[in-house]
Image: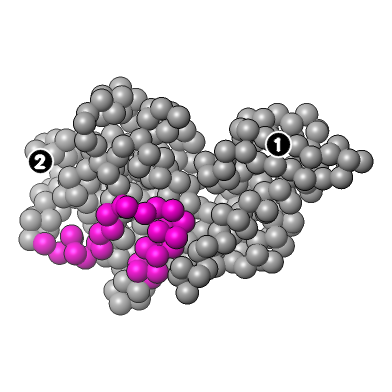
Amino acid sequence: MDPYSLATRNTVEIVTDEELRALLDQPARSVYAGYEPSGEIHLGHLVTVNKLMDLQKAGFEVTVLLADLHAFLNHKGTLDEVRETAEYNRRCFEALGLKGAKYVMGTDLQLHPDYELLVLQLSQEVTVNRAKRSMDEVGRGMDHPAVSQMVYPIMQMADIAMLGVDAAVGGIDQRKIHMLAREHLPAMGYPSPVCIHTPILNGLDGKKMSSSAGNLISVADSEDDIRAKMKKAFCPPEVEENPVLQVLKYHIFPRFETVNLSRPEKFGGDLAFASYEAVEAAYGAGKVHPLDLKKMTADYLVEMLAGVHDAVA
């Protein structure tokens, strides 16, 4: 797959496509994504992890910001707690295949005087209302936000500048923060980042993915847990917003060239799919039963996550 196709597959928005194409023509290019250390790594996190792996293959130098200070500001625990979780998250990411990336702890970057000065300079340019709106999709308790949560998006802008990266990856819920960075960093002498946005996937019940709802698959789940959760997953006849198909599209096919469905001849026999589009077409035409789709997806999830447990134990 060519670098542009790798960089753009399974995204919902590139800001801007022209800038990305120009960046791909450069001899060196860099990208980052930041992760709040806030618990188990699950399939929601893996959408951007898979995108970073795509970008590595496309020639980008990848930086992962383990945003312990961001998590602290967003009420995710004490600094000691989130730092411990950050180290666990790093081991998960590497075990999932994101090797050769540069891992940066937030507090190693964000407590430097130059960084703090840039945060203060940016805070002069961003209104409280704009900062709050940028946090609405990612913050906790935003009906009554703390001052710390208004600092959060400004720090994320400073992260991009001080890491010196050309591009930023995030879920589409990060869009408003990224647009702040594109708008305000040039006035501070930093280039606007290319922004690569990935979708927010449904939970296994077809609703918003949430740890508290238990509608997700974590890297800590056992093989039995994965199979049991996938067996109960919502899998309507339609292809739109189908969480099982989303797992195949965003997690399985980026890692496996061919996906095989094994079933008795009386139910149609074995099938091999060389692309997600082929699975979607077969399922949409009624040629694959929901139970078969879920079993096939579970088989590949188990294989994909098999090495993670030992690596992070």
Quadrant that contains the N terminus: top left
Q: Residue furthest top?
A: 18
Instruction: Let me know if residue 167 appears in the view.
Output: yes
Q: Amino acid at mark 2?
A: Met
Relative to residue 273, is residue 291 drawn left or right? right
Instruction: Tell whether position 292 is magenta.
Output: no
Q: Residue furthest right?
A: 266
Label located before the other in sequence (2 or 1): 2
Horizontal and vertical percent position of residue 203: 60, 52
User: Residue, x 25% and y 59% (percent of image)?
Assistant: 104
Quadrant hosting residue 218: bottom right
User: Residue, x 17% and y 45% (percent of image)?
Assistant: 164
Looking at the image, is 29 positioned above or below residue 83? above
Looking at the image, is 65 positioned above or below residue 175? below
Instruction: Identify the element where label 1 is drawn.
Output: strand
Instruction: Identify the element where label 2 is drawn.
Output: helix
Instruction: Find disc 1 in the rendering and name its residue.
Output: 272
The reply to whether callout 2 and callout 1 are in contact (CB within 8 Å) is no
